[in-house]
Image (tube, rainbow, N blue to C red):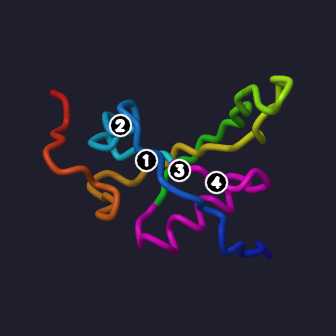
Amino acid sequence: MLKWRKNMLIKPIITEKAVAEMPHNRYYFRVATGANKTEIKKAVEKLFAVNVTAVQTATMPGKKYRSGRRWMIRQRADWKKAMVTLKEGQKIDLIEIPGVQPEK
């Protein structure tokens, strides 16, 4: 039995690369670090009512930054992203960017 986490999908990733992949039925999400591919697939299918064919995940290292009075080097927490591929002909309307056409 899968545990349902309320904040499994944290937010969609809207970058130049992610927007270029949208016409090819691929969407990027920032997800919880403990989430696995099966949980991500079920969460996307339940939330957006689409069929997911593939999920790829990557753990991104947190960036280093300097702060404080002595410019101490600190590091942000690592985070996880997921690339979700949908079934042909389906799309997520909430994330679609108007004016983006598929490449030919």
Quadrant where the C terminus is found in the figure: top left
Residue at screen point 49% across, 73% down: 47
Q: Is residue 41 above or below residue 29?
A: below
Upstream in the sequence, badge 2 or badge 1? 2
**Mark 2 vs 3: CB contact within 8 A:** no
**Mark 4 vs 3: CB contact within 8 A:** yes
Numbered disc 4: secondary structure: strand
Alpha carbon of mark 1 to alpha carbon of mark 4: how far? Answer: 12 Å
Residue 91 shown left or right of residue 38 in the figure: left
Which residue is identified by label 1? 27
Residue at screen point 60% across, 67% down: 42
Q: Residues within 10 Å of mark 3 (few under 14, many from 20)?
A: many
Which residue is identified by label 4? 31
Alpha carbon of mark 2 to alpha carbon of mark 3: how far? Answer: 13 Å
Q: Is residue 79 above or below residue 49?
A: above
Which residue is identified by label 2? 21
> Percent from the top left, x then y, of residue 84?
50, 48
**Mark 3 vs 1: CB contact within 8 A:** yes
Q: Nearer the viewer, mark 4 or mark 2?
A: 4
Q: Residues within 10 Å of mark 2 (few under 14, many from 20)?
A: some
Q: Residues within 10 Å of mark 4 (few under 14, many from 20)?
A: many
Upstream in the sequence, badge 4 or badge 2? 2
Residue toward you, 10 or 2: 10
Numbered disc 2: secondary structure: helix
Which residue is identified by label 3? 29
Alpha carbon of mark 3 to alpha carbon of mark 1: how far? Answer: 7 Å
Alpha carbon of mark 2 to alpha carbon of mark 1: how far? Answer: 7 Å
Alpha carbon of mark 4 to alpha carbon of mark 2: how far? Answer: 18 Å
Residue toward you, 83 or 72: 72
Name the kind of residue labelled 2 in the image: Glu
Q: Is residue 78 above or below residue 9?
A: above
**Mark 2 vs 1: CB contact within 8 A:** yes
